[in-house]
Amino acid sequence: MAVIHRTTMTPGKLELLAGWLPARPWYTGAGAPELARAGGFRLDDPQGEVGLEFMVVTDTSGELPVSYHVPVTYRGAPLDGAEQALVGTSEHGVLGRRWVYDGAHDPVLLAQVLALFQGRAEPQDQNLSDTPDRTVTASRPGTGHPVITSATARDGAQGTTVTLATADRDGEETSSATLAVTRVLRPDPEDPSAGGAEAGGRITAGWRTPDGAVARGPFFVLTG
């Protein structure tokens, strides 16, 4: 499992995101954001090479606070062909230079999100090593352990949509699925164990609102 290092990042995560968010088509603000951490969770990379974090940050710069879901990956070297997904670089106090990417465009993160839907990955606490996060739930009807053969992510005003091509582990059967990445988080009281109205399923997690309450809603929705 990933180890959480008690050290510094320069520039810090919020500083990187504050410079990156305004150019996103799903950003609802009118200027520079004022960000605060509001929650999230992690997943482990089975190879132990890539950090996988699902951050929630709340922007209080406007009349009403807005909470954003930003999945990010931390890499020790640039990801080939992903220049458009680079959030920035930062100096980690233990690991050295890290390349920080929008995780919706990173194949390692997408593979582990799919594994979480299928019950093959376990959500981890955002701030503690070797500590599962039991508050994150995933529902996905059906069986099987498909692997991703290709992924195309598109950012729009409503969020990010990833078109996935998948195959079974023998590579004999291929199918397609659509993964919707929620960017602007809104509380949703619907029971995630029911799978929602979608034909696939959803990953539901919580975050803190500015008044100290805990809200829950879908971070990912999978259809197809």
Image (cartoon, grey):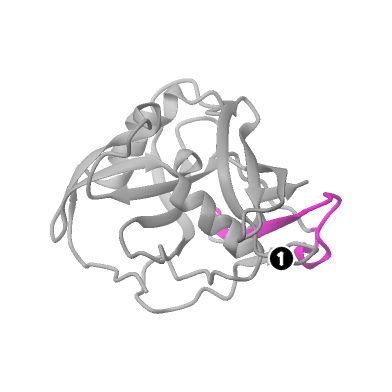
Q: Which residue is mark 1?
A: 144
Q: Amino acid at mark 1?
A: Gly
Q: Is residue 90 magenta?
A: no
Tell me the element at label 1: loop
User: How many marks overall?
Assistant: 1
Task: Specify whether 196 is left or right of 115.
Answer: right
Can residue 207 be seen here? The reply is: yes
Q: Nearer the viewer, residue 78 or 147?
A: 147
Viewport quadrant of the N terminus: bottom left
Counting from the top left corner in percent of width and height, residue 220 is at 64, 50
Q: Nearer the viewer, residue 187 or 180?
A: 180
* Residue for point 60% across, 67% down: 136
Counting from the top left corner in percent of width and height, residue 165 is at 64, 42
Counting from the top left corner in percent of width and height, residue 21 is at 42, 31
* Residue for point 23% across, 39% down: 89
Can residue 210 be seen here? The reply is: no
Quadrant of the rendered image containing residue 135: bottom right
- Up the image or down, 12 lies above or below 49; here it is above
Counting from the top left corner in percent of width and height, residue 35 is at 40, 41
Q: Residues within 10 Å of mark 1 (few under 14, many from 20)?
A: few
Task: Specify whether 97 is left or right of 190.
Answer: left
- Up the image or down, 224 lies above or below 169; here it is above
* Residue for point 65% across, 59% down: 204
Q: Which residues are magenta?
A: 190-211
